[in-house]
Amino acid sequence: MLFFGHRFIESQDFYHVSDIESIKNTPPSSTIYLSFSEDNLDIIKHLQSNQLSFGLRALNIEQIMYASSLGASFIVVSEDLAKSAQNIANNYLFDAKILVKIKDEDEIEELAILGVDGVIFSNAIIKTNS
């Protein structure tokens, strides 16, 4: 299981951006984070064309499928969607890893039993402004 933002496991941070200009304010080789939205397709296309690693927040199965097709390295879902998302990722052999955003370490056990690729705590997501 991958851990991002856990208090005693060193990991990379994700940089939440709201526009292309914000990407310039992230460290080199950063993983960019944003919600899947048609309004964000310009940012996603920019990330793709510059071969930047990114994670997309997906709210439903349709968005999970789009996120994978758009080349996301990580797909972040809610705990309610975790099992379905992981099953789909395994079935379609996604390159993307399924992450569940969690608030408490007590959630890790259940997600490990479900076979989810990883978890991400809120502190691993850094808001970046342009």
Image (cartoon, grey):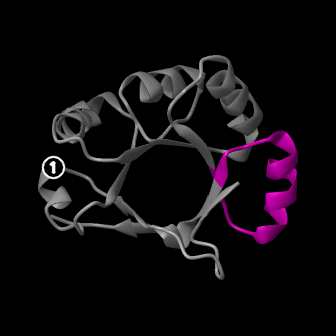
In-image side of 21 versus 71 (left or right): left
Q: Position of residue 73 (x, y in %)?
A: 44, 41
Looking at the figure, which quarter contains the C terminus?
bottom left
Residue closest to the eye, 122 or 24? 24
The number of numbered badges drawn on the structure is 1
Q: From the viewer's side, name the closer residue of 126 and 6.
A: 6
Q: Is residue 24 magenta?
A: no
Camera-nearest residue between 57 and 71: 71
User: Seen in the image, is 59 located left or right of residue 83?
Assistant: left
User: In this rendering, is residue 15 above or below 97?
Assistant: below
The three-letter amino acid code for the residue at tag 1 is: Ile
Residue 31's spot in the image, x, y percent?
36, 56
- Residue 55 relative to residue 86: left or right: left
Q: Does dot 1 land on a helix, a strand or a loop?
A: helix
Picture residue at 25% right of the left edge, 31% below the top: 41
Asked where in the image residue 9 lies, by quadrant, the reply is bottom right
Q: Is residue 29 above or below residue 6?
A: above
- Residue 53 in percent (x, y) is at 34, 47
Instruction: Name the residue at 19% across, 57% down.
Output: 23
Residue interval drawn in magenta: 100-118
Residue 54 drawn at (x, y percent): 36, 46
Say whether residue 106 is magenta. yes
How many neighbours does mark 1 have within 10 angstroms: few (below 14), some (14-19), or many (20 or more)? some
Answer with left or right where residue 114 lies relative to residue 93. Answer: right
**Residue at screen point 31% across, 61% down:** 30
Disc 1 target residue: 20
Q: Residue at (51%, 36%) from the top-left corner? A: 96
The quadrant of the rendering that contains the N terminus is bottom right
